[in-house]
Amino acid sequence: MPLLFKSYVFLGILVALVSSSCVNLKHIAEFSETSLEGIGQYEQLASSFHQRCEADCEQQSIRNLTIHDVTCNCTPDKKADSITTIIYKSISGYLFGLKTISASKLTRYQTQDLTDALTTGDFGPIKLNTDDVKAYSNISTVILRAFTDGYRRSKIKKYVSEAHEPLTQLVHFLRLNLAGNLNGKLEVQKSLLKNFYFDLVADEKLSVYERTKFAEDYFNSLKDIETKQEELKNFSKALESISEGHQVLYTHINNLTDDEVKTKLGALKNRWNSAMHTYFKTK
Amino acid sequence: MENLTSEQVKDLADNLLRMTNALGDFRYEHFQHLSEEENMRLKELHSQQLEFTTEVYTRAALLVMTDAKGSLEQINTITKETQRLYKNLNDVQKVLERASAVLTLASAIISLDTKGIANSINGLLM
């Protein structure tokens, strides 16, 4: 009986240890999940390099009044999309990995089946007391979890530290391609539209109705492009929050229970939510 | 001379766009004073420069692959390690489940429960 009492005390201490380790990893799991949601919006983006190339090509055909035998070489733009997607998938893959290994349920091992097999099984002359089996099974589960949680915590620290620089670089390159290069192509398209519509709107040989219609077309097309640019800008802000969130994890990697970490990640989550709210409003 | 980075090429494209738009603005602002021929020539030049600029943006996007190669390799290695860790931690649960199944089989053998033996073996094979 005293042995069982000691075991329960030991069990209590271990439960406390395991519970505190779960809280530490919860920040990481929440950060990864929120970041995954944010970066996942990449797949919903309304513009791509290939689409811009086709739109430019179409605009050129309209300018030249040609609809027959129109060929567009958009191969480099398709490749640019592939590169951007590879970067997006690599970031998502890492965040997904971080999420799965920091999920609290991962090391919540189920030993009920083992306990049942031990207590109800017929093992010949060996007779096991049901209460003892349950108590030792609980203790072994807690020890197992404390060990595996400690192990994965040290692994997570290693991964976050090693991944920080490449992740920051990849987020930077994803932003460079979307908010930099793709946005630049949209900016060029705006200039091409003005180049085309300017003479039509200014042409006094056309009726006022025709000129008004051309001006209307111009402003509608311009608005469409600006909506796409706004979408890229908001997505880029969400990417920046991911980078900043990872920086918080990296800086406080040895003290993840710190309230400061919790507060900083919470603030980033709010900023991300606000960026996403604006993002959905522009859609 | 070293190769240009994606960032440098993107900056070049931004500068090209600014210069090209200056040409466009000149045409829009002096439209009334330009001959039809001059206007058409400027319009064509502006359009050609814009087409060139958009190609430079694509080129910058393609160069990102060269610049990001090292980071991509590093992050993919870490991702594989996280997957391995996840599998190992999950394997502990599998070991527990298998231990239960073996115990059930042992119990069935000891009690000579033929139906139980068959069920346990099936469970282990699943």
Image: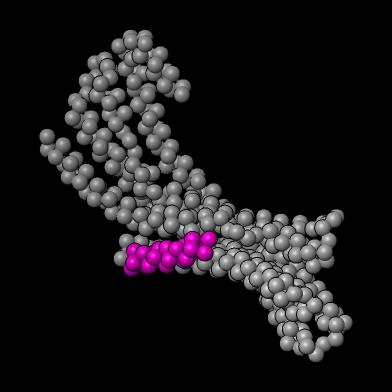
Question: Does residue A2 sit above or below A221 in this rendering?
Answer: above
**Residue B9, percent from left and from top:** 71, 72
Which quarter of the rendered picture does the N terminus of chain B lie within?
Answer: bottom right
For image coordinates 68% across by 74% down, the residue present is A212
Question: Does residue B75 sit above or below A188 in this rendering?
Answer: above
Res A183 → quadrant? bottom right
Which residue sits furthest bottom? B33
| Residue A190 in view, yes or no | no
Q: Nearer the viewer, residue A161 or B30?
A: B30
Magenta-colored stretch includes residue A251? no
Res A83 → quadrant? bottom right
Question: Does residue A260 sit above or below A78 in this rendering?
Answer: below
For image coordinates 33% across by 35% down, the residue present is A110
**Residue B51, percent from left and from top:** 77, 70
Which residue sits furthest right? B37
Total numbered labels = 0
For image coordinates 77% across by 62% down, the residue present is A57
Magenta-colored stretch includes residue A277? yes
Question: Does residue B26 sit above or below B125 in this rendering?
Answer: below
- Dominant SS in magenta: helix
| Residue B82 in view, yes or no | yes
For image coordinates 40% across by 32% down, the residue present is B95
**Residue B106, percent from left and from top:** 35, 18
In the image: residue A182, left or right of residue B79: right
**Residue A20, percent from left and from top:** 28, 54
Image: magenta residue range: A260-283
